[in-house]
């Protein structure tokens, strides 16, 4: 069998690892990959549907596969689309779903002497990210600074690039799913509650990474903060064991939700003080407590900011990145200002600023106070502009705000 892969426009780490696992399984089974869809007996389309933009892209790519395949070729759709918007998925046509919770079904479709759980999928190439311009820009910039650093060691890779993925990372999936009940999120319908990988399996992969010469290991999970809640363990316990596996590597963590950063504050601070953990992403989502409560985020923004600031200022941690959402239902001008002020209030090296986009069946869709697309776009652009001036160019708060006001006017 010859297969062809169409990558998602949103290559989140979990999705990238899913594709790497499927690819590895098929190749180990003796099948071959082709770059030409017309030569493929099977077309695998990787999808994301956490917002409308990526859902639209996913549907477009599935239809491209159906139209571009050779006669009789099977189209398999992986990723979250089939679970997040099942009615839309079912309307598309003759395709087979392989959602995150169903990946093991690949063994039924294409039996192999080597089972799926024996496949290593820890190394990911740049090709997995090519469909996303933002990811690729970050990867290229990080590569450029890395090359410059080798020639001129006094020029360091900027902190805001710390969480940008690179092929030099050894990726390990620590868990999938989460324990959150966020009112806007549909991803949990695809990935479910937390399912932690057993510590001995993770430690074995860490040792493999060290033997292969990797110097940075990236732990992936929808929320590594709640790691172990289902197996009587915790993220601090795991990290302590991981760091015992060798001394010549460091660790970054894809996501630690603020609620868990606060819960495990003392234990994580002690670990970060070793200097062995470089960075992590803590999605703050909003600076307004009213909005966080409406989002069902379960933490106080003041405590989350204090925890982030302490970790960056007082431990060996290099940086923290984050995500904010603008235009959530009920977000007033004053609520947005509180989010906007996070740029100066929290020691976050890089934010991803997202517009709220309702997902089918999400509780947030029943809320009143919908924010117009025009205002959402204005707030997103304003946030991003000030972030670039302050974090990338190093301007002071007042100077940056003066420039932003000249460009965008008053906050709406």
Image (spheres, rainbow, N blue to C red):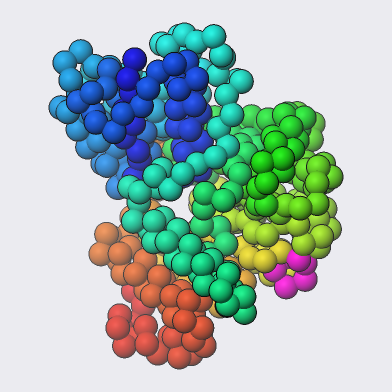
Query: 221 above or below 398?
Result: above
| Count of numbered tags | 0
Q: Which residue is at a point 52% across and 49% down the rendered structure image?
A: 167
Residue 192 visible in rendering: yes
As rendered, which of 363 and 196 lies closer to the eye?
196
Percent across and percent down for residue 307 are 71, 63
Query: 86 above or below 107?
Result: below
Outermost residue on the front side: it is 151
Chief secondary structure of the magenta portion: helix
Image side of residue 379 versus residue 268, left or right: left
Percent across and percent down for residue 256 are 64, 50
Q: Which residue is at a point 81% across and 55% down the rendered structure image?
A: 271
Q: Magenta span covers which residues? A: 311-316
Query: 91 above or below 337?
Result: above
As rendered, which of 358 and 82 lies closer to the eye?
82
Percent across and percent down for residue 357 are 35, 49
Image side of residue 253 versus residue 137, left or right: right
Q: Which residue is at a point 34% across and 15% down the rendered structure image?
A: 1
Image side of residue 242 versus residue 163, left or right: right
As rendered, which of 395 and 366 lies closer to the eye?
395
Magenta stretch contains residue 164: no
Percent across and percent down for residue 62 are 25, 30
Quarter of the image for residue 119 reads top right
As rendered, which of 180 and 283 lies closer to the eye?
283
Image side of residue 311 versus residue 109, left or right: right
Q: Which residue is at a point 39% across and 44% down the rendered structure image?
A: 127
Residue 77 visible in rendering: no
Q: Quadrant of the C terminus?
A: bottom left
């Amino acid at each position: 069998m010859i297969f062809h892969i169409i990558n998602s426009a949103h290559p989140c780490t979990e999705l990238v690892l899913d594709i790497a696992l499927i690819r590895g399984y098929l190749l180990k089974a003796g099948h071959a990959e082709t770059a030409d869809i017309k030569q493929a007996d099977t077309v695998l389309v990787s999808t994301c549907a956490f917002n409308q933009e990526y859902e639209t892209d996913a549907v477009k790519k599935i239809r491209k596969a159906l139209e571009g395949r050779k006669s009789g070729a099977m189209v398999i759709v992986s990723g979250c689309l089939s679970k997040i918007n099942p009615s839309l998925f079912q309307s598309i046509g003759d395709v087979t779903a392989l959602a995150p919770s169903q990946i093991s079904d690949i063994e039924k479709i294409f039996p192999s002497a080597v089972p799926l759980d024996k496949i290593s999928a820890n190394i990911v190439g740049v090709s997995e990210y090519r469909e996303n311009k933002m990811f690729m820009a970050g990867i290229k910039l990080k590569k450029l600074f890395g090359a410059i650093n080798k020639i001129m060691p006094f020029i360091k890779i900027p902190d805001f690039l710390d969480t940008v993925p690179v092929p030099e990372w050894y990726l390990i999936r620590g868990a999938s799913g989460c324990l959150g009940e966020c009112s806007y999120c549909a991803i949990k319908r695809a990935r479910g509650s937390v399912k932690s990988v057993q510590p001995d399996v993770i430690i074995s992969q860490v040792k493999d990474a060290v033997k292969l010469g990797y110097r940075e290991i990236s732990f992936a999970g929808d929320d590594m903060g709640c790691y172990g809640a289902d197996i009587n363990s915790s993220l601090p316990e795991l990290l302590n064991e991981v760091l015992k596996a060798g001394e010549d590597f460091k660790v970054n963590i894809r996501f630690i939700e603020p609620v868990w950063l606060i819960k495990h504050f003392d234990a994580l601070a002690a670990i970060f003080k070793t200097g062995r953990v470089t960075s992590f992403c803590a999605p703050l989502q909003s600076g307004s407590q009213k909005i966080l409560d409406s989002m069902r985020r379960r933490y106080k923004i003041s405590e989350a900011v204090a925890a982030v600031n302490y970790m960056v200022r007082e431990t060996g941690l290099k940086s923290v990145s984050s995500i904010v959402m603008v235009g959530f239902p009920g977000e007033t001008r004053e609520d947005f200002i509180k989010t906007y002020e996070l740029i100066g209030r929290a020691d976050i090296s890089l934010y991803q600023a997202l517009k709220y986009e309702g997902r089918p069946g999400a509780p947030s869709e029943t809320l009143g106070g919908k924010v117009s697309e025009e205002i959402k776009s204005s707030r997103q652009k304003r946030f991003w502009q000030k972030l670039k001036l302050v974090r990338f160019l190093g301007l002071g708060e007042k100077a940056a705000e003066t420039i932003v006001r000249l460009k965008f006017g008053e906050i709406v």
